[in-house]
Image (tube, rainbow, N blue to C red):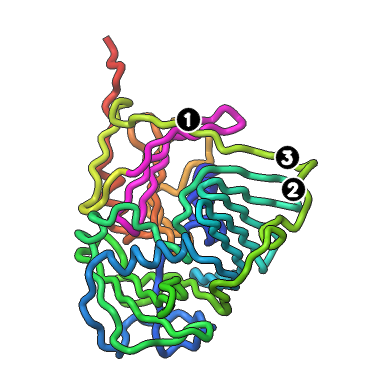
């Protein structure tokens, strides 16, 4: 696997926490069970106003105080984390402790994120949107409503000891996956979610196994476990770019819009351009770097997969492109194959 691909996966699904995709659940699962299963539910569903219930979930994740443990499952990978979230009326503050594997923590104030790696005495800093579990992406409500329909379960369900309402999100075409959610009946906080494939099988899921909402949170509860005074701090460097002006012609899949275009700079003077597309829930990232024939780390060429993330690698002109996202593989392939580069400095 190339260094770029490892970096891309890290940026797109950092330990499965920073962008754990909204997902849903089936009533037959126990509250704490995360066993993959097929998505169909016997629950009767009623039509909901598209986008409204998801905006309520997003607002709850942002403005409520809560402490809990949630579990994330992607394929055979299972990871549990403790989250502490405070909203003081102006700013969000959050701490996520990964409870399985090597110790690490995420600290967030609004969109500023620090990733603490104690075995390397390293602090990685980056500006990222705070729309991750128990929030949703929902960066473009109008786009979302064109791409998905929403239905509500008519009977309450129960997750982590709390009543919740089931929400079924169905894609309107084949370019995205479906989702099943369960939000707290009293506060709208998202308690459990599943991403559902086109075959009805759960691709990944995340759920609270215990949660306390509205609890008092002190600053000590948000403080890191370790003193980082003598640790190395690395700030992710990036700046906005215009890929069209640079010669790239990237036709977006139906329902997706461009949300970000940046150039990422690394300590070895390597520069990689990144384009992010979104349909309101799902995201696709395109990483573009110069292709150097003497390097052997490019790949894989063509289709690949890492957990729930589909990947497509392709050489375009003198560049290597890695296209990835939690979207159907055919959508990525069609996108990657349609990308063109037109040199802005034609030879004379």
Q: Which residue is tagged 2? A: 120
Q: Earlier in the sequence, mark 3 or mark 2?
A: 2
In the image, farthest residue toward the front: 89
- Where in the figure is residue 41, as x and y percent of width and height? 32, 86
In the image, farthest residue toward the top: 348
Tell me which residue sits at (71%, 45%) in the image.
122
Q: Earlier in the sequence, mark 3 or mark 1?
A: 3
Whether the magenta-drawn stretch holds residue 271 is answered as: yes
Q: Which residue occupies the foreground of this view, 334 or 87?
A: 87
Q: Quadrant of residue 97?
A: bottom right
Q: Which residue is tagged 3? A: 232
| Mark nearer the viewer, 3 or 2 | 3
Q: Which residue occupies the foreground of this view, 79 or 193?
A: 193
Tell me which residue sits at (47%, 66%) in the image.
134
Q: Which residue is tagged 1? A: 292
Mark 3 and mark 2: span between their CA atoms?
9 Å
- Where in the figure is residue 251, as x and y percent of width and height? 23, 42
Report helix, strand or loop for mark 2.
helix
Whether the magenta-drawn stretch holds residue 313 is answered as: no
Q: Earlier in the sequence, mark 2 or mark 1?
A: 2
Q: What span is colored magenta in the figure?
A: 259-287
Local crowd size for mark 1, using a 10 Å CA cut-off: few (<14), some (14–19), many (≥20): few
Look at the numbered discs 3 and 2 and tell me whether their residues touch, using CB distance below 8 Å: yes
Report helix, strand or loop for mark 3.
strand
Report helix, strand or loop for mark 1.
loop
- Where in the figure is residue 42, as x and y percent of width and height? 30, 90
Q: Which residue occupies the foreground of this view, 276 or 144?
A: 144
């Amino acid at each position: 696997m190339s260094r770029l691909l490892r970096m891309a996966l890290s940026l797109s699904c950092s330990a499965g926490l920073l962008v754990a995709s909204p997902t849903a659940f089936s009533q037959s699962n126990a509250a704490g069970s995360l066993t993959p299963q097929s998505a169909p539910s016997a629950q009767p569903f009623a039509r909901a106003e598209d986008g409204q219930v998801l905006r309520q979930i997003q607002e709850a994740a942002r403005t409520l105080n809560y402490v809990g443990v949630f579990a994330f499952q992607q394929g055979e990978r299972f990871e549990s984390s403790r989250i502490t979230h405070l909203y003081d009326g102006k700013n969000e503050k959050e701490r996520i402790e990964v409870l399985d594997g090597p110790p690490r923590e995420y600290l967030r104030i609004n969109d500023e994120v620090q990733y603490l790696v104690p075995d390397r005495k390293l602090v990685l800093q980056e500006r990222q949107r705070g729309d991750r579990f128990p929030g949703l992406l929902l960066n473009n409500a109008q786009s979302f409503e064109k791409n998905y329909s929403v239905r509500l379960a008519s009977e309450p369900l129960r997750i982590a000891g709390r009543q919740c309402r089931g929400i079924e999100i169905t894609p309107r075409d084949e370019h995205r996956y479906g989702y099943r959610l369960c939000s707290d009946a009293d506060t709208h906080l998202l308690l459990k979610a599943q991403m559902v494939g086109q075959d009805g099988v759960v691709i990944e899921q995340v759920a609270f196994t215990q949660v306390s909402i509205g609890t008092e949170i002190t600053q000590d509860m948000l403080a890191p476990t370790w003193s980082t005074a003598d640790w190395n701090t690395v700030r992710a460097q990036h700046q906005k770019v215009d890929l069209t002006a640079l010669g790239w012609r990237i036709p977006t899949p139906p329902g997706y819009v461009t949300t970000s275009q940046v150039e990422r700079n690394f300590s070895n003077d390597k520069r990689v351009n990144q384009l992010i597309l979104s349909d309101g829930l799902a995201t696709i990232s395109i990483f573009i770097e110069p292709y150097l024939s003497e390097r052997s780390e490019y790949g894989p060429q063509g289709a690949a997969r890492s957990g729930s993330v589909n990947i497509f690698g392709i050489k375009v002109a003198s560049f290597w492109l890695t296209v990835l996202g939690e979207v159907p593989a055919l959508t990525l392939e069609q996108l990657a194959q349609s990308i063109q580069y037109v040199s802005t400095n034609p030879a004379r």
